[in-house]
Amino acid sequence: MPTIFELVDADNADAIRELLARQPAAAAARDEQGLSPLFRAAYGSRTAAFDAIRAAVPQTDPWERILVGECEGLPAPDAWSVDGFTPLHLAAFAPNAAAARTLLDAGADPDVVARASFARVTPLGTAAFAGATEVARVLLDHGADPSLGEQAGGTPLEVARANGNAELVALLESARTER
């Protein structure tokens, strides 16, 4: 019998629903990186798996609340995920502008750099990667520096250009000239 993580990786929503109907606790499992099935589905862009887990498991932990679009009961603004991101990075990835606003209003640093070995990036850089224009707007409104780039890569503007996101490019160009 495949594990929930194998089913997530296969984006097999039907099998995930069947497994969670028999074993609801499987939704609380953690992979070798410490990620839940919901995180694994989100990070892997496994939409069917994400939706199946979400439908079967209405209870979410504080980190997962950001992923599912909630903005209450979130982790502390200066907390770190097991994979090296702050809640603000996750709000940019989700994209969840309401959570980003909540976290910034609670004192989150808009220019904090992720600790993840594969992405030493600010929340604005994550928003550029994810195409999260509304989150980028919230970050800029709270003082995020658009000139800060990934330590091994480009600025948020360069990432938005590479991804072909004209709306985000215009927003970042405007923010850059206002500084």
Image (cartoon, grey):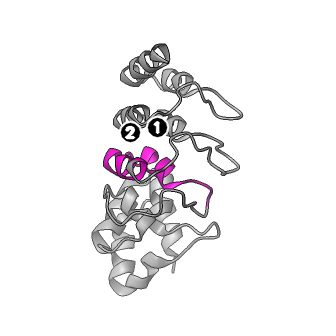
| Residue 130 seen in the current view | yes
Q: Residue at x 50, y 18 (%)?
A: 179
Residue 61 percent location from the top left of the image: 41, 71
Residues marked 1 and 2 touching at CB (< 8 Å): yes
Residue 40 percent location from the top left of the image: 51, 61
Range drawn in magenta:
83-104
In the depicted view, which residue is nearer to us: 165 or 123? 123
Element class at badge 1? helix
Q: Is residue 100 magenta?
A: yes
Q: Residue at x 50, y 69 (%)?
A: 36
Q: Amino acid at mark 2?
A: Val
- Find residue 18 and report its image quarter: bottom left
Element class at badge 2? helix
Q: Which mark is residue 127?
A: 1
Q: Is residue 94 left or right of residue 112?
A: left
Residue 73 percent location from the top left of the image: 35, 66
Q: Which mark is residue 56?
A: none
Q: Which mark is residue 135?
A: 2
Q: Earlier in the sequence, mark 1 or mark 2?
A: 1
